[in-house]
Amino acid sequence: MKHGKRHRAEVARSLPEWERKFLSYKALKRKLKLTHRARSGTEDTGFKQSLNRELDKVNTFYLDKEEDYIIMFRELECRAENRNGTEEMLELKREVLDFYSEMVMLLHYSVINFAGLVKIVKKHNKRAGGAVYSWHMHRVLQQPFFSTELLYNLIRGCEAILEHLSPPNGP
């Protein structure tokens, strides 16, 4: 299966409501084909601008989600410390698990977009030369959506909350 089809299928399967927030691989590939046919610097600039717009779109979405998750995590953490009763504890566990799964989906979002960017930059490299590839790859590796350390810390924090909410193992 071609990467473009795999990319679209993965996006549709992941979180359909986020579909417009994913990298527009197909549009970038079309732009790249135009660049290859025209072989002009103007068309190449158009591809680079499109690539930069896509990077901005992905980063903006990722950073917005990360900010929301920090706030949500703090709220869940506070509620876990001040819980009252078993029923509230069970509801809180469910919310933490839902939150946990959404953060895992954001990690998945990061991986899918990174794979698409690597693939499209490789295609551009074949047509334009190695210097462009190394410049873009260096830039992609420094993007916020690729820096998932904060997200991993939040996921570990959710695991700690769940552990705190679980009754201690008895004999």
Image (cartoon, rainbow, N blue to C red):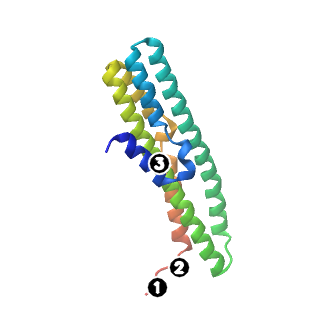
The residue mark sitting in front, 1 or 3, is: 3
Q: Position of residue 25 (x, y in %)?
A: 45, 36
Other residues around mark 2 within 10 Å, as few (<14) / some (14–19) / many (≥20): few
Q: Position of residue 54 (x, y in %)?
A: 52, 33
Q: Position of residue 110 (x, y in %)?
A: 46, 45
**Residue at x 63%, y 63% (from the top left corner):** 76
Q: Position of residue 128 (x, y in %)?
A: 35, 19
Query: Which quadrant is the C terminus positioned in?
Result: bottom left
Asked which secondary structure carries label 2, the reply is loop
According to the image, label 2 marks what residue?
A: 167
Foreground residue, 59 or 25? 25
Asked which secondary structure carries label 1, the reply is loop
The residue mark sitting in front, 2 or 3, is: 3
According to the image, label 1 marks what residue?
A: 170
Check disc 2 and give the amino acid type. Pro
Is residue 104 depicted above or below 138 in this figure?
below
For marks 1 and 3 on the same chain, the one whose residue lies earlier in the sequence: 3
Q: Is residue 24 left or right of residue 69?
A: left
Other residues around mark 3 within 10 Å, as few (<14) / some (14–19) / many (≥20): many
